[in-house]
Amino acid sequence: MKTITKTTLLLVLMAASFGGCVDKSMEKITYTANVPVYLSFDEFRSSFTVSDPIDISTPGKIYFKDNYLFVNEVSKGIHVIDNSDPANPEKIAFYEIMGNVDIAIRGNILFADSFIDLIALDITDIENPVEVGRLENIFPEVFPEGDIWYPYAMVDRSEGVIVDWELRTITEEREVGNTWEDNIFRHDMVFTSTESGGASWSAGAGTAGSMARFMLNGEYLYLIAHPWMLKTVNTIDAGKMNVVDSVEVQRNMETLFRLEDRMFIGTTTGLLIYDIADASKPRQISSYDHITACDPVVADGDYAYVTLRTGTRCANGQNLLEVIDISSLTSPYLVKSYPMYNPHGLGIDGDLLFICDGTAGLKIYDKSDPLDIINNKLAHYPDFFTYDVIPVNGILMLVGEDGIYQYNYSDPGNIVQISHIPITGDRR
């Protein structure tokens, strides 16, 4: 009887103790967070359509091919512009592609990202494109960006494609001591921020701006699937695209630039140089390290040109133009560093170097002497915000906050604006 009493008392005390632990280890919290807005996978993958031209509202990246200029409308699609007469560019269509940011074109096939998928469009009839291929879930970590001042919550990718976020007040039980990082923030998220008839498409790829995240090499498309993963896609049959190589990169990749059988990758902490002679399997040759900053890159001959800038995603950096000697691809080194205001995209044509210096405008330099570029400024046009440029055959195509500009730069010291397509829509 004595033993039973002791045992019973012990069990009661243990139960009370455990109950107390449960009560103390859980708590209710209430917070405001970004909650996903889903679209079913079927509805998302049947959403591509083409419409009449619309106003340019939020211009992003630009691409040029066969007298057509393609301008990304951030996260919405692509403006198609007949640029056969650069003095009178004509918007002819808008490709509605949800979640689109990047573009690449080979022959008559246009490749574009659409949130988590890569799609291929046959643009033989440019006003009536046809979706001919889709590589699903190649960008599984890509999402639209929500309100940056609030965390993200209630993410369930099986529900569909996240196409937007809404702010909601959430109350939930949580183990005491758990932080928001444990339960709310999702560390694996990557935010992405003519006439009718047939067009005559030349073989090969078009020309991208320096902010490109896609790069073509023959039948292969290189793409930054997320900042730490470079993927190679076989596109020989647009209807059967497949990933043939994936490379994990221990850096935060931002841009791709091809020069013959070399690919230059701009990252937030340096420049990577890859051998792409075997187009199906890029191989790293070397790297060059720099301070942490956003980093597009272009190259020609013995030099690569890198702009570094500070910004919301590129903290702790400086605003610079760096000239890197790449005559020995295995041992690139810094030749000279020049101060800039807030440089974004850049372009080169012969001895001309065009720099979009953010709100400081467009700057043009003679780069023939890499040690004295800063003192060889040919022109400065400071009156507008500039983002990226494509110089082709004496015509400079520029995307800025106020729209799409084109200039004749046959006289680099006195370039002449020949057209401007303004932003007339509602900027978000």
Image (spheres, helix red, strand yellow):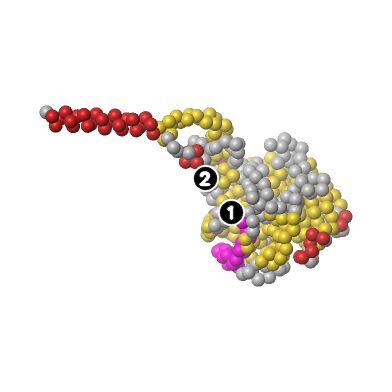
Could you say which disc has been placed on residue 252 in the image? 1
Could you say which disc has been placed on residue 289 in the image? none
Q: Residues within 10 Å of mark 1 (few under 14, many from 20)?
A: some
Kind of residue at disc 2: His
Q: SS at mark 2?
A: loop
Mark 1 vs mark 2: which is more N-terminal?
Answer: 2
Q: Is residue 401 left or right of residue 43?
A: right
Kind of residue at disc 1: Asn
Residue 333 visible in the current orientation: yes
Could you say which disc has been placed on residue 187 in the image? 2
Give residue 299's position: percent from left, percent from top.
70, 63
| Vertical comparison of 136 with 283: above or below | above
Question: Residue at coordinates 18% horizontally, 32% vertically from top-left?
Answer: 7
Give residue 422's position: percent from left, percent from top.
79, 41
Give residue 26's position: percent from left, percent from top.
40, 32
Q: Residue furthest bottom?
A: 328
What are the residue bounds of the magenta stretch? 268-287
Q: Nearer the viewer, residue 378 or 1?
A: 1
Question: Residue at coordinates 79% horizontally, 62% vertically from top-left?
Answer: 373
Quarter of the image containing the N terminus?
Answer: top left
Q: Is residue 386 left or right of residue 29?
A: right
